[in-house]
Image (cartoon, grey):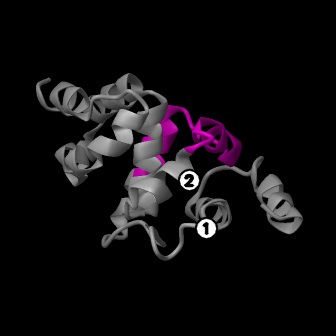
Amino acid sequence: MNFGKRTKIRLLLNKVINIKTLNSYLLLKFDDLIPELLYEGFGDFESNQFDLLYEMENYGLKRIDDFDKIIPSDYLNIIKQLNLKLNFLGTIRVIMIINDSKKYTENYLKFKYRNFWDITCLQDMTKLFSKYNISIEEVITEATQK
């Protein structure tokens, strides 16, 4: 990571998470993955942005720094190795699950944003989650049986 990029990221770390700061941070942090493996944007619906902010807040992520701290140090390399393709929305959700799948599942069940996406779509990410010793089948089962 070059000096200018590190400085720009550092300037964002204390910022409150909103779509503008999150987008700026993701563009910098994951620039090596864009556009081949990581698609800019938060999905097809404008409401996805609000849902994501709601998810992140309820997960306990208030500032960009809070999110930055939960990204595994090997995440970018593993995404490249597995040749996985995600958008910003999927990337953030996957990182929250990798960080604490129980916490994510509890929030998924507790709050109504689960109506906006189907956690079973994560089945395609089995190889990624297995790198972090997470059984996505167990996560899906927990999230869909309660």
**Observer-nearest residue: 35 or 74?**
74
Horizontal side of 82 relative to 137 (left or right) equals right
Instruction: Work out whether residue 50 can be spotted.
Output: no
Q: Name the residue under label 2.
A: 76
Label 2 is placed on what type of residue?
Answer: Leu
Label 2 crowd (10 A; few <14 / some 14-19 / many >=20)? some
Label 1 is placed on what type of residue?
Answer: Asp
Q: Quadrant of the C terminus?
A: top left
Horizontal side of 98 relative to 142 (left or right) equals right
Horizontal side of 139 relative to 37 (left or right) equals left
Q: Residue 134 in the image: x percent, y percent?
A: 35, 29
In the rendered image, which quarter is residue 37 located in? bottom left
Q: Looking at this view, name the residue that lies furthest to the front.
A: 81
Task: Please give the name of the residue rendered at 67% of the width and 48% of the height, measured from the top-left corner.
Answer: 64
Tag on residue 102? none
Relative to 86, residue 101 above or below? above
Query: Marks 2 and 1, Cα distance to the nearest angstrom?
Result: 8 Å
Q: Is residue 88 inside the magenta stretch?
A: no
Q: Is residue 55 inside the magenta stretch?
A: yes
**Observer-nearest residue: 41 or 50?**
41
Task: Please give the name of the residue rendered at 26% of the width and 34% of the height, measured from the top-left corner.
Answer: 136
Label 1 crowd (10 A; few <14 / some 14-19 / many >=20)? some
Q: Name the residue under label 1.
A: 32
Horizontal side of 78 relative to 119 (left or right) equals right
The answer to which of marks 2 and 1 sits earlier in the sequence is 1
**Observer-nearest residue: 74 or 145?**
74
In the image, which residues are magenta? Answer: 52-74
Q: Residue 22 in the image: x percent, y percent?
A: 60, 59
Q: Residue 109 in the image: x percent, y percent?
A: 25, 30
Relative to 40, residue 14 above or below? above
Mark 2 vs 1: CB contact within 8 A: yes
